[in-house]
Image (spheres, rainbow, N blue to C red):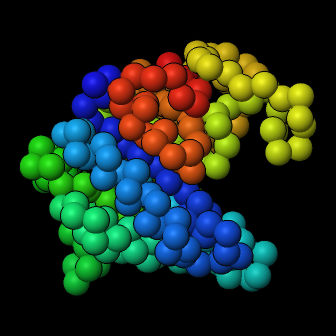
């Protein structure tokens, strides 16, 4: 196995599946199955989930809600998604712990780095909700930061496209996918892989990122097995 401990970033929007908002149970089930395949191989899995399917801080500003307040609302949205994931993972026979960047002790544990690592060592899937717990950050930054803290081998950014392309493949049919890129190249080509905070954290800590299609059956397992899937940035 190429990777022993992974941090998987899933966007909130991905959880919508074919729906216009909220959580699609079909997609949730599919994600649980994909993750179960890798935990069955003894891989330690941590998950950071976004909240874009429910609420984004920047949207708040447009509607007259204070930005910081909106960001906290966004963080709460990620907890809703995280709880849905937790439940579905358990339905699929995985042991889980939900750790949050905000205090919500009835439903989540607080994030304590050493505890998170211990959970992973015991084979529990650790889900990080509520982002970092600070406004003006994203769940991509959360993914990079938590990955560094728990000493993950890689950040896997699960998206609905097959990797990083020369142009937006949903708009430009001539776009081609990069197999591998250096951080420097990705930066110079202005490829939007993650927001700058998240990207820089990975670069400075030599933490590789793989952008891949989480909706492709078996992709997660293939990555773990060292097969070339998506785009590797290192
Ligand atoms: N957020 C935040 N701090 C964090 C993580 C998230 O303020 O550490 C807020 C922010 O408003 C963001 C929202 O939570 O827009 C939802 O997260 P994100 O947009 O990253 O979700 P995704 O795009 O992955 O669905």
The image shows residue 162, relative to residue 18, as above or below, that is above
Q: Is residue 95 above or below residue 188?
A: below
Identify the residue at the far front of this view: 217
Q: Residue at x 83, y 29 (%)?
A: 175
**Residue at point 43% right, 66% down?**
29
Res. 22 image quadrant: bottom right
Residue 3 percent coordinates (x, y)? 31, 28
Which is nearer the eye, 19 or 118?
19
Direction from residue 34 to residue 124 in the image, left or right: left
Location of residue 52 with respect to 141 vertically, above or below: below
Is residue 86 visible in the rendered image? The answer is no
Residue 100's spot in the image, x, y percent?
31, 66
- At x 68%, y 82%, the residue is 65
Residue at image position (46%, 60%) is 30
Q: Name which quarter of the figure residue 231 lies in.
A: top right
**Up/down of 182 relative to 121, above or below:** above
Q: Nearer the viewer, residue 205 or 19?
A: 19
* Quadrant where the N terminus is found in the figure: top left
Percent position (x, y) of residue 108? 25, 73
Taking 128 as reference, is 188 left or right?
A: right
Q: Is residue 65 left or right of residue 142?
A: right
Residue 80 in sight from this viewpoint: yes
Query: In this figure, what is the number of numbered marks?
Result: 0
């Amino acid at each position: 196995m190429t990777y022993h401990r992974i941090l998987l970033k899933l966007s909130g929007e991905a959880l919508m599946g074919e729906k216009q908002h909220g959580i699609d149970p079909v997609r949730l089930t599919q994600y649980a199955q994909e993750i179960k395949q890798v935990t069955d191989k003894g891989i330690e899995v941590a998950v950071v989930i976004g909240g874009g399917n429910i609420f984004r801080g920047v949207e708040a500003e447009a509607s007259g809600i204070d930005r910081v307040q909106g960001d906290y609302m966004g963080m709460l949205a990620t907890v809703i998604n995280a709880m849905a994931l937790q439940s579905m993972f358990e339905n699929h026979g995985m042991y889980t712990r939900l750790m949050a960047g905000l205090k919500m002790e009835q439903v989540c544990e607080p994030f304590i780095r050493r505890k998170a690592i211990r959970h992973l060592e015991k084979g529990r899937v650790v889900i990080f909700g509520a982002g970092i717990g600070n406004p003006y950050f994203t769940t991509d930054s959360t993914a990079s930061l938590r990955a560094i803290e728990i000493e993950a081998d890689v950040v896997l950014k699960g998206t609905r496209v097959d990797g990083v392309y020369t142009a937006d493949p949903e708009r430009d049919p001539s776009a081609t996918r990069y197999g591998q890129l250096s951080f420097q190249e990705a930066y110079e080509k202005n490829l939007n892989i993650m927001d700058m905070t998240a990207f820089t954290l990975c670069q400075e800590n030599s933490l590789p990122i793989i952008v891949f299609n989480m909706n492709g059956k078996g992709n997660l397992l293939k990555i773990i097995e060292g097969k070339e899937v998506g785009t590797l940035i290192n």
